[in-house]
């Protein structure tokens, strides 16, 4: 059994790796954002994170940092948020590099579900005599890498439905306009969510009503690929965009094949309902404003609804936070709508 002091040291080092991964979250897709810490025998530590596609993986970055400082990495303990790769892609296998460096122990948060890895990195390390421990801060890393893990397991992007609503559940006025339900802080948070997403989808109706840009101009990060369900007016600010007229399932399959890890849905009630009713939403992000539109305002969802409490759809509360005068509520759907409180 691991001593408490050693466990605490492992968690501290893994937390450093998690923080390093967070710093590169918006630059690595379609590769996972991974952090790594090399802790040498003399106590010195070196941190690395995955570079943009074609660049070094986190383990190599950390090893190179140690070598640049003339540190001896033989016998070192390595902490990495995701299982080291074991195959040749754009770069060489990290597991082999760790073995050749002479590290003694590798602590990994989670196994990589990618079919090119899927435990083989850990096996390669163990076969070479390296001690491998898996599971340190696994829940935290699992949340951090959720879009990547979902994509590798399903072949589809992780779908985040974002909606802004008044306290009485209205997402637009009677004329269809929705600018602005929430305040500046919430809008900045939306731009951050866009920057975390590889693509964003809205309906043609929202484009006609609000003429959104769907950029990340309020934060530091790339703007997502823009997709319109239907046809966008020729002079709409959303251009250049992909105009999609096929099914949502076909869209998710296409985007998954294109390496889109996270898709943000930022449409109105019709688009939101289409994803919601089809069970295609993996996470709901709802910004609630202390405002009222009344019964003439447009609801969060259109179409069918629960006729009895037995048919209610329940979710799992992930988090809440205050955004200026607004509240953000993050909910994951439950696998069934028959759960009761």
Image: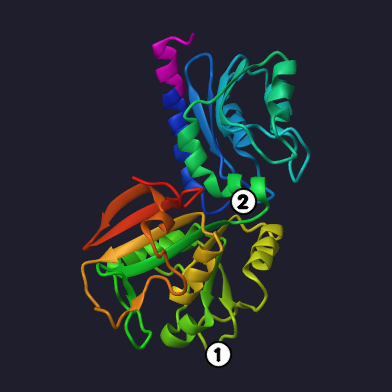
Q: What segment is highlighted magenta in the picture?
A: 1-10
Q: Nearer the viewer, residue 77 or 154?
A: 154
Q: Secondary structure at mark 1?
A: loop
Spot occupied by residue 34 in the image (x, y as percentages of width and height): 56, 40
How many tags in the picture? Answer: 2
Image position, residue 137 (x, y; %)? 47, 29
Q: Is residue 171 above or below residue 2?
A: below
Q: Secondary structure at mark 2?
A: loop
Q: Which mark is residue 52?
A: 2
Q: Is residue 82 above or below residue 205?
A: above
Q: Nearer the viewer, mark 2 or mark 1?
A: 1
The x and y percentages for residue 283 are 47, 55
Asked whether residue 2 is drawn in magenta, I would say yes
- Secondary structure predominantly adopted by residues drawn in magenta: helix
Nearer to us in this view, 240 or 176: 176
The residue pinned by badge 1 equals: 233
User: Which residue sits at x=40%, y=59%?
Assistant: 285
| Residue 51 in view of the camera | no
Mark seen at residue 166: none
Q: Residue furthest right?
A: 88
Residue shown at 44%/39% (left/top)? 19
Which quadrant: the C terminus? top left
Instruction: Evaluate whether residue 175 shows in this view.
Output: yes
Q: Does label 2 or label 1 sit earlier along the sequence?
A: 2
Asked if the residues shown at circle 2 and circle 1 are in contact, with their CB atoms under 8 angstroms apart, the answer is: no
Q: Classify residue 151 as left or right of residue 318.
A: right
Q: How would you rate the neighbour count of disc 2 (Cα within 10 Å): few for under 14, some for 14-19, many for 20 or more?
A: some
Give the percent coordinates (x, y) of residue 239: 57, 81
- What whole-number distance in Å separates the C-alpha atoms at marks 2 and 1? 34 Å
Determine the image quadrant of residue 127.
top right
């Amino acid at each position: 059994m691991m001593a408490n002091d050693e466990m605490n040291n492992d968690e501290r080092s893994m937390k450093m790796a998690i923080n390093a991964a967070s710093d590169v979250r918006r630059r690595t897709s379609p590769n996972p954002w991974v952090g790594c810490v090399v802790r040498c025998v003399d106590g010195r530590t070196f941190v690395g994170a995955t570079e943009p596609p074609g660049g070094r993986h986190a383990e190599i970055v950390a090893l190179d940092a140690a070598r640049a400082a003339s540190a001896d990495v033989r016998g070192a303990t390595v902490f990495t948020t995701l299982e080291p790769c074991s195959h040749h892609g754009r770069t060489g296998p990290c597991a082999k590099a760790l073995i050749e460096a002479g590290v003694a122990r590798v602590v990994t948060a989670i196994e990589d579900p990618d079919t090119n890895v899927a435990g083989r990195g850990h096996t390669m390390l163990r076969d070479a005599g390296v001690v491998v421990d898996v599971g340190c801060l696994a829940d935290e890393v699992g949340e951090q890498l959720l879009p990547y893990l979902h994509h590798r397991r399903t072949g589809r992007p992780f779908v985040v439905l974002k909606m802004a609503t008044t306290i009485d559940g209205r997402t637009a006025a009677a004329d269809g306009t929705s600018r602005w339900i929430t305040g500046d802080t919430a809008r900045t948070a939306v731009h951050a969510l866009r920057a975390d997403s590889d693509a964003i989808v809205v309906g043609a109706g929202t484009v006609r009503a609000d003429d959104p840009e769907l950029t990340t101009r309020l934060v530091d990060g790339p703007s997502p690929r823009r997709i319109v369900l239907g046809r966008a007016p020729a002079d709409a600010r959303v251009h250049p965009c992909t105009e999609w007229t096929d099914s949502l399932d076909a869209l998710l399959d296409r985007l998954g094949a294109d390496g889109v890890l996270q898709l943000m849905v930022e449409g109105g009630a019709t688009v939101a309902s289409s994803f919601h009713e089809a069970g295609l939403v993996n996470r709901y992000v709802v910004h609630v404003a202390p405002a009222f539109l009344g019964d003439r305002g447009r609801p969060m969802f259109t179409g069918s609804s629960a006729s009895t409490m037995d048919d209610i759809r329940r979710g799992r509360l992930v988090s809440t936070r205050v955004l200026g005068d607004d509240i953000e509520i993050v909910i994951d759907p439950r696998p069934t709508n028959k759960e009761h409180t």
